[in-house]
Image (cartoon, rainbow, N blue to C red):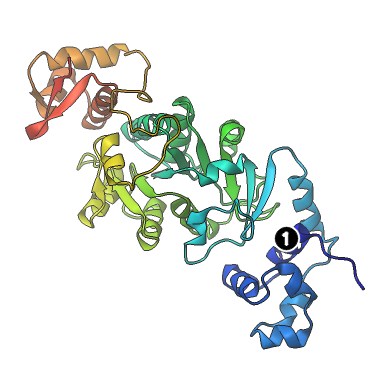
Amino acid sequence: MSPPREPRTAWLRLLRTPGVGTATFTAILEAFATPEAFLDADAATVRAAGLNPALRDGTPGADDTGVTADLDWLAGPDHHLITRSDPRYPDGLHAIADPPPLLFVNGDPAVLARPQLAVVGSRKPSRGGEDNAHEFARYLAGSGLTITSGLALGIDGAAHAGALAGGGTTVAVTATGPDRVYPARHRDLARRIAGGGAIVTELPTGTGVRREQFPRRNRLISGLAMGVLVVEAGVHSGSLLTAQHALEQGREVFAIPGSIHNPMARGCHALIRQGAKLVESARDVFDELPPIALPGDGDIPADTGAGAPQAGLGEDYEQVLEALGHDPVAFDVLAGRTGLTADTLSSMLLILELKGHVTACSGGRYARSH
């Protein structure tokens, strides 16, 4: 009688079997409950379950180089394998149409069970868009939400950095193996994310960058989160695919409007026309999410309360406050007084509003809060 299989090895062997995608892996689990049972079944039993015995016969051996590399990675500190039979597997992913059979996690798996908001957008955002992503993520993470994104350049990176700056947690879902960091310039950011949050992928070690893997990664970003906030995106942006996944998965979709002259705002405007929630403040996000238990006392703070950015105002921000005077001012008038571009001024007003220095009034006007 052959010795029992090591459960992790069976999952990893099946993951690396050619022809076994998420749908086939799901069918195997439904028929046999575990990969070990499938690999140990005879051909007749496999055929009776409507599966091809060649999938079992073609599985790499237990000493396969790839599986060995996976196990070597898992031997590292804070490296985890979470399978669909693991109680730590996120409920949100159980509910999507094509849940990954397993997840490689670098960091703390417990953060995957926390309330999450995905923040996504362009890889080449405007300065205002990048600032918006950072400040929204900073405030929302400081309020108790875990910020989830894709570790890409631009909006993703700004969202992760903002969440960390707010003293909160963040989850990065990647489209490579767990032993790779892409883009390479985010290596230090990835280290910081794993230190207090988690980096997650469904792909085995050694998997490099391939275009087709990014849309599949996006379904996990939306699947982990209660909603997706699109900060800035062109009309053909991959962020819109993440928003589409969110809609299909029954998640909330939020979008921040921008200047009509900014091509990176057109994707957000398209989402708003299709019914996405228009977001002007963090409160707009919380108002649409279902009741959630947040860390701490469980209360959602006001936009000027705990968790709001606390950094001092710089000279540019003082200039905007000076230009506001003491009466409500129209945006165009304020732009004329300051000489700032529409994108830059919009971003600065948002930050001032989050900090409690500015209030948005009716008719597109702004006023000092105190």
Percent x, y of residue 81 = 68, 51
**Vertical placement of 191 versus 201: above or below?**
above
Viewer can see residue 3: yes
**Vertical placement of 150 versus 100: above or below?**
above
Residue type pointed to by label 1 = Leu
Residue 31 horizontal side relative to residue 359, left or right: right
Residue occupying the point 84% across, 63% down: 62
Report the residue that reaches farthest toward the right: 1
User: Mark 1 highlights which residue?
Assistant: 12
Percent x, y of residue 36 = 76, 68
The residue lying toward the viewer, choosing from 246 and 232, is 246
**Vertical placement of 313 versus 37: above or below?**
above
State which quarter of the image contains the C terminus.
Answer: top left
State which quarter of the image contains the N terminus.
Answer: bottom right
Viewer can see residue 182: no
Residue 326 horizontal side relative to residue 108, left or right: left
The picture quadrant where one finds residue 326 is top left
Residue occupying the point 44% across, 34% down: 158
Residue 256 horizontal side relative to residue 237, left or right: left
Disc 1 crowd, CA 10 A, few/some/many (<14, 14-19, 20+): many
**Label 1: element kind:** helix
Please state the total of marks drawn on the protein image: 1
Residue occupying the point 63% across, 70% down: 25
Percent x, y of residue 341 = 22, 28
The picture quadrant where one finds residue 180 is top right
The residue lying toward the viewer, choosing from 121 and 115, is 115
Residue occupying the point 61% across, 62% down: 101
Report the residue that reaches farthest toward the front: 297
